[in-house]
Structures are given as structure tokens and as C-alpha cells.
Image (spheres, rainbow, N blue to C red):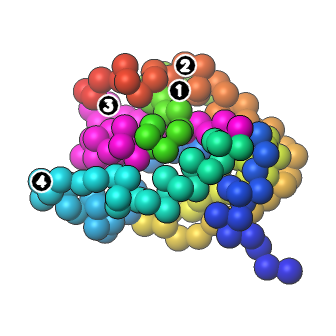
Amino acid sequence: MTAPTFEELFRNCQRTAVHLEMRDAYMKSDKAFIDWKAGKTLDPAERWADWHSLVMEATSRGVEVRRARVVSAPVSEYIRFEHAVTDGLNIAAGEAVRWLLRRQATDIALPGNDFWLFDSSLVLLNYFDGEGENMEVELTEAPEVAKLCESAFETVWKRATPHAEFELS
């Protein structure tokens, strides 16, 4: 049996899809990041139309989609890019997004990797290399992993600042 695609995981989600990001840079080879650095205007709804459709379809079914980002201060150039596109990319698609400064996460038991958690039970772990390039993903339904990820996410979420109020340092 083949593993479901990310799109299938999202489409099969019934209640919640939460994403915890903990790196200060991702895929610096991403054309959107390169264009942003060059000062080009980005239309997130156009550039990431598939993401918009996927999230909007899920939220229209009543799925709560939340993303929390744990970041260092002062923030990296990549985090500035993410912050700049969040309104048009994530918020416009129906996600709720919050930011937490890393120094405020010291006493939170965080998993070693970024993840998506679907319906509090299915975890998609994201593995990146040292430069932030995507290497692979792993899917697990291990209850102890799901419990850790859910606890970490909810603790970060409670402490984090909503996107509209988060000021870059």
C-alpha cells in the first residue's frame, strides 16, 4: 500500500490540521523567496493557487487549520519573507497563524522536527537538511508522537502572538 499524498492527508482531515514550524530558514532555493529578495511583487493567491484551494476546501468543510511559527530574534531574512507573504498566502486561504519568539519557548517540550498533525492522531514529520532544504517526510500514527506534537503545538499556540499583532524584530 502506498502512503497518501499530502493533498490526500489534507482532504481526508475531518476536524483539525495544525502545523508547527521551528526553523529560521527553509528552502532558500525557493523561486518565490529568490523573487522576494530581488524586490519582485508576489501575488500569493496566484503563486500558490493550489495551496489556497486545498486550505479553502478544508476550512469550508469545517476543518480548523492553524500554523504556529517559533522564530529567533532578530528574525532571519527568510522569516521576513514568510511574514511578508502570510496575509496573502496563509490568512487569505483560511489558516490562523501565530508567531512565538524562540526565547519564549525554552520550557516547552518541542519535537525535534517540524510537523503537521491531522485530527490529533496522524503526524507528518518534515525532515530538512542543515540549509533548510526539504529532504523527506515520515508519516506516523504512534500515539506517543501524536500526543507530544499536540501538546507542543497547543502550548506554543497559547503563548504565541497572532500574525496581525506580531512585529518583526
| Amino acid tagged 3 | Ala
Q: Is residue 9 above or below residue 161?
A: below
| Res 84 → quadrant | top left
Badge 1 amino acid: Ala
Circles 1 and 3: CB distance less than 8 Å? no
State which quarter of the image contains the N terminus.
bottom right
Q: Identify residue for label 4.
A: 39
Question: Is mark 3 in CB contact (under 8 Å) with mark 4?
Answer: no
- Pointer 1 residue: 105
Q: Which residue is mark 2?
A: 159
The answer to whether residue 110 is visible is no
**Nearer the viewer's eye, disc 4 or disc 1?**
4
Q: Mark 2 touching mark 4, by CB under 8 A?
A: no
Which residue lies at the image location 48% right of the left edge and 29% below the top edge? Answer: 98
Classify 10 Å Cα crowding around label 4: few (below 14), some (14-19), many (20 and above). few
Towards the viewer: 89 or 80: 89
Q: Which residue is mark 3?
A: 73
Q: Whole-Å distance between the Cαs marked 3 and 4?
A: 23 Å
**Residue 149 pos. (x, y %):** 71, 40
Tell me the distance, in whole angstroms, between the alpha carbons under discs 2 and 3.
Answer: 16 Å
- Disc 2 marks a residue whose amino acid type is Arg
Q: Which residues are magenta?
A: 62-89
Note whether 125 is above or below 96 in the view shown. below
Q: Mark 3: give few (<14), some (14-19) or many (20+) Cα within 10 Å.
A: few
- Residue 100 lies in the magenta stretch: no
In whole angstroms, how far apart are the C-alphas of marks 2 and 4? 33 Å
**SS at mark 2 in the image:** helix
> Looking at the image, is mark 4 or mark 1 earlier in the sequence?
4
Of circles 2 and 1, which is in front? 2
SS for callout 1: helix
